[in-house]
Image: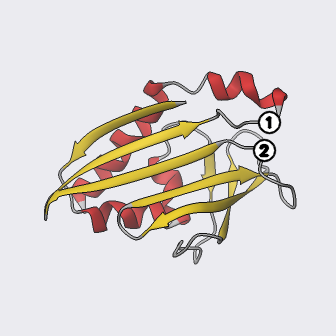
């Protein structure tokens, strides 16, 4: 598991909209993983699923939302279409400091990953990769 956090000079609401709307995610993805996501998939609850297209393969991933608290937390488990998620998880946690500042933590957790083929890439996801996404997200939110 790897995790990074930082303070962002934006409200939790502004930041969360960029995360919970999958169509916005390719704008801040610092892992060079997401090419696109269809609009109209704004996440609003646990149990929903959104799709995204991967950069390198062009394949679609179904992302199953497993944690959700509006403006506070969202987490999903990606899977190939029609298949059970193999166990890795992307999580964002937001802690409002005040109306214009938020502590944001981004986590990638592969500890339950059952697909051995994916373990090398999962373990290669570093704090730097997560920090890149968090910094890009912060830049967008702070300009909003």
Left or right for 140, reference 114:
left
Left or right for 66, reference 9:
right
Relative to 53, residue 22 above or below: below
Question: Badge 2 local density, few (<14 within 10 Å), some, or many (20+)?
Answer: some
Quarter of image, res 116 = top right
User: Residue, x 67% and y 44% (percent of image)?
Assistant: 55
Left or right for 62, reference 15:
right
The residue lying furthest to the front in this view is 112
**Where does residue 101 sit, x and y in percent of width and height?**
16, 54
Specify the quadrant that holds the C terminus.
bottom left
Relative to 62, residue 92 above or below: above
Specify the quadrant that holds the N terminus.
top right
**Where does residue 95 sit, x and y in percent of width and height?**
27, 54
Quarter of image, res 117 = top right
Dots 1, 2 in contact, CB < 8 A: yes
Q: Secondary structure at mark 2?
A: loop
User: Residue, x 60% and y 55% (percent of image)?
Assistant: 76
Q: Earlier in the sequence, mark 1 or mark 2?
A: 2
**Where does residue 82 sit, x and y in percent of width and height?**
87, 61
Q: Secondary structure at mark 1?
A: loop
Task: Indicate which disc residue 86 carries.
Answer: 2
User: Residue, x 38% and y 42% (percent of image)?
Assistant: 134
**Where does residue 125 sit, x and y in percent of width and height?**
57, 27
Relative to 41, residue 36 above or below: above
Question: Badge 1 local density, few (<14 within 10 Å), some, or many (20+)?
Answer: few
Mark 1 → mark 2, Cα distance in angstroms:
5 Å
Quarter of image, res 127 = top left
Question: Observer-nearest residue: 42 or 84?
Answer: 84
Q: Which residue is mark 1?
A: 114
Relative to 25, residue 21 above or below: below
User: Residue, x 51% and y 56% (percent of image)?
Assistant: 25
């Amino acid at each position: 598991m790897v995790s990074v956090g930082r303070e962002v000079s934006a409200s939790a609401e502004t930041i969360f909209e960029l995360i919970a709307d999958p169509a916005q995610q390719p704008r801040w993805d610092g892992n060079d993983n997401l090419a696109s996501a269809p609009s109209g998939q704004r996440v609003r609850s646990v149990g929903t699923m959104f799709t995204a297209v991967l950069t390198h393969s062009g394949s679609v991933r179904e992302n199953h939302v497993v944690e959700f608290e509006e403006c506070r937390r969202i987490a999903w488990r990606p899977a190939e279409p029609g298949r059970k998620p193999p166990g890795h998880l992307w999580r964002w946690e937001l802690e409002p400091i005040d109306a214009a500042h938020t502590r944001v933590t981004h986590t990638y957790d592969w500890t339950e990953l059952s697909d051995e083929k994916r373990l090398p890439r999962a373990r290669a996801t570093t704090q730097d990769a997560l920090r890149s996404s968090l910094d890009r997200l912060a830049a967008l939110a702070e300009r909003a």
